[in-house]
Image: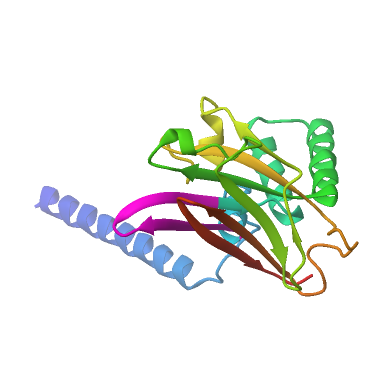
């Protein structure tokens, strides 16, 4: 009889603990929701990357001619990039500040784009050459058009770049294009209308990418 009573008391004790446990869950579930903090450096970067990246594919019939993806490296994007880079490599505040200042200086000096290109024939993927089979222009919403100051090819062995630009695949080549901030008539690009458009033309295909934003 004593053992039965002991088991009964034990069962009641466990039952009480269970009730307290579920009550705690219900109370915590009904409490005020925690306010979400600012996005992490990774999340903020990939949001900026998505916001400032565009792409197109050019075909002739069913045959691919050119796959082209580009990211506009404006001030917002550069800030997100440096924040992620600093977080990834645990840079101190001094190095982070120095890198940030350099990036923002570049943003003031040029309209710069990171882009990748795929062509079925690798010999035609020559955007960095002066006699390239491709012509690249930057145009704003007022019709002002400029050619790049430079297009530099990035070594395909730099695998780290693929982490920052996931659309950069093994079959593409990567480049950085710098365009002047001012057209020949002295008009700032972009002008009052916040539109930038990259035009790519060539015998193998053509396409356009457009960015719209508030000045």
**Looking at the image, which is closer to me, 161 or 206?**
206
Query: What colour scheme governs how the chains and residues are painted in the rendered image of this protein?
Result: rainbow
Q: Which residue is at a point 76% across and 44% down the rendered structure image? A: 149
Tell which residue pokes out farthest to the top in this image.
157
Magenta region: 52-69
Q: Position of residue 124 (x, y in %)?
A: 48, 38
Which of the pair 84/3 is nearer the observer? Answer: 84
Residue 210 is one of the magenta-drawn residues: no
Above or below, 17 against 166 in this view is: below
Q: Quadrant of residue 90?
A: top right
Instruction: Pick the residue in front: 5 or 109.
Output: 109
The location of residue 70, given as percent across then percent down, is 58, 51
Q: Is residue 13 visible?
A: yes
Classify the position of the C terminus by image quarter: bottom right
From what the image shows, is residue 152 above or below residue 104?
above
Query: Residue 53 in magenta?
Result: yes
* Quadrant in the rendering for residue 208: bottom right
């Amino acid at each position: 009889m004593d053992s039965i009573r002991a088991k009964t008391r034990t069962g009641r004790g466990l039952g009480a603990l269970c009730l307290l446990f579920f009550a705690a869950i219900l109370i915590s579930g009904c409490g005020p929701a925690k306010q979400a903090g600012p996005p992490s450096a990774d999340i903020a970067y990939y949001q900026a990357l998505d916001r400032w990246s565009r792409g197109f594919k050019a075909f002739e019939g069913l045959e691919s001619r050119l796959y082209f993806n580009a990211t506009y490296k404006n001030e917002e994007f550069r800030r997100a990039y440096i924040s992620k880079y600093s977080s990834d490599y645990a840079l101190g505040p001094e190095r982070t500040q120095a890198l940030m200042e350099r990036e923002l200086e570049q943003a003031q000096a040029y309209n710069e784009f990171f882009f990748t290109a795929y062509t079925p024939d690798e010999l035609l993927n020559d955007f960095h050459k002066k006699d390239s089979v491709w012509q690249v222009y930057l145009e704003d919403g007022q019709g002002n058009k400029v050619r790049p100051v430079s297009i530099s090819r990035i070594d395909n062995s730099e695998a780290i770049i693929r982490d920052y630009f996931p659309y950069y695949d093994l079959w593409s080549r990567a480049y950085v294009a710098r365009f002047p901030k001012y057209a020949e008539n002295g008009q700032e690009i972009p002008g009052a209308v916040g539109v930038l458009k990259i035009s790519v033309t060539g015998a193998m295909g053509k396409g356009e990418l457009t960015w719209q934003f508030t000045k």
